[in-house]
Amino acid sequence: MIYLDNAATTKASQAAIDSMIKYAGEDFYNPSAGYAPALAVKKALGKATADIADLLGADPDEIVFTSCATESNNFAFECGVKNKKGNIVVSAGEHASVYECAQRLKSRGADVRFVMPDGNGVVTAEALAQVVDGSTAFVSIIHCSNETGAVSDIKALCAAVKSVSPKAVFHSDGVQAFCKIPTDVHDLGVDLYSVSAHKVGGLKGVGALYVRKGFNMQPFIVGGGQQNGRRSGTENTGGIIGFAEAAKIYKNKAAAFDAKALREAVINVFDGHDGVRINGRGTNSGYILSVSFKGLRGEIIAHMAEDEGVLVGLPSA
Ligand code: PLP
């Protein structure tokens, strides 16, 4: 079987599985407790937080763990938009977990504006400039598209937005970029950035949100005050520690792997065939290949591929 749907989810790395077993079993303690074994778990959690921060170019106190990137994106919207007047801008190519947040705000009467990606799936500063104005309050642009792999220049987009509306909050969904595209959130200039564990060898049910230092982030989930009150709920210790271990392994592997060359090799198989279109030939992460077949339904192609032992996403996660 050839599994070509790693953008939907990856097989968990052994390190992530081992962490889950360790912190559910022998080291099961609640990291908020005061006795020595619990403090050891808290320390391991702190190390994992520092590792994830390091992978993002952030500081540890800028990382909030969540139950998934869907929660991170909802968190960003709920708290980034709260009590702010002004319009909200998202790209038309967002993952459903961003797009539906925008649609919900729209249905509540907010001024939500959509920016169209270009023919390659990239959001350009020119296109963004057409919808952003001095009263823009919140912008969310996906870093790497989960459907086409198109990579937008988040640093340039963020700077463009802030030059027009300095107080606007800029969020980016970095799920498909994390550990694949060199990313330094401080350099990007974003306020909020979402990532997920199970796309990089971690377990499902773990995500994180980068929250820029100094950004006044009110909690989305309130309760026992864990994570400095920013996201209550007993931490998923094994999941988070395993996320950090898996992400470090993934990033090292990705650094030594030429995804773009492999993608080009696969594109060459399709090229020249009538009715076959490669979507997003320009700026691309290399990790996602989107192909359309004129006149054929995707389900048919996907089932034919499965009959040959090849599993593909349809149309994407
Ligand atoms: N954002 C993007 C770009 C994704 O590809 C995904 C996963 O499908 C998500 C968000 C949601 O991630 P999670 O499954 O952790 O909620």
Image: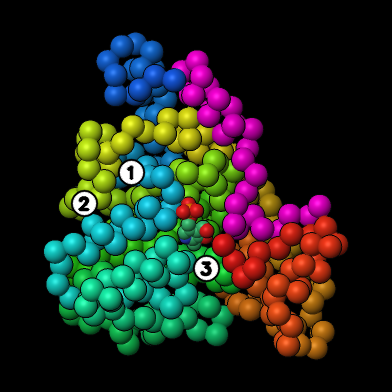
Give the left or right position of residue 169, taking residue 287 as reference.
left
- Where residue 32 appears, as percent x and y from the top left, is 29, 24
Query: Dividing the image into 4 quarters, which one contains the C terminus?
Result: bottom right
Q: Dot 1 surroundings within 10 Å: few (below 14), some, or many (20 or more)?
A: many
Q: Mark 1 highlights which residue?
A: 64
The CA span between labels 3 and 2 is: 26 Å
Decide: marks 1, 2 in contact (CB < 8 A)? yes
Q: Mark 3 highlights which residue?
A: 145
Q: Is residue 234 above or below residue 3?
A: above
**Residue 159 seen from this side:** no
Camera-side residue: 77 or 278?
Answer: 77
Magenta stretch encompasses residue 7: yes
Disc 1 is placed on an element classified as strand
Indicate the amino acid at tag 3. Ser
Give the left or right position of residue 287, taking residue 217 as reference.
right
Corner quadrant of residue 149: bottom right
Magenta stretch encompasses residue 14: yes
Q: How is the image coloured?
A: rainbow
Camera-side residue: 48 or 304?
Answer: 304
**What residue appears at the point 18 percent right and 75 percent down from the top-left corner?**
86
Indicate the amino acid at tag 2. Met
Q: Is mark 3 within 8 Å of ligand 1?
A: yes
Instruction: Of the two numbered discs 1 and 2 on the same chain, state the one appearing first in sequence.
Output: 1
Q: Mark 2 highlights which residue?
A: 217
* Residue ranking furthest to the top: 36
Instruction: Of the two numbered discs 3 and 2 on the same chain, state the one appearing first in sequence.
Output: 3
Camera-side residue: 231 or 249?
Answer: 231
Indicate the amino acid at tag 1. Val
- Where residue 128 appears, as percent x and y from the top left, is 36, 81
Q: Which residues are magenta?
A: 1-27
**What residue appears at the point 31 percent right and 81 percent down from the top-left corner?**
113
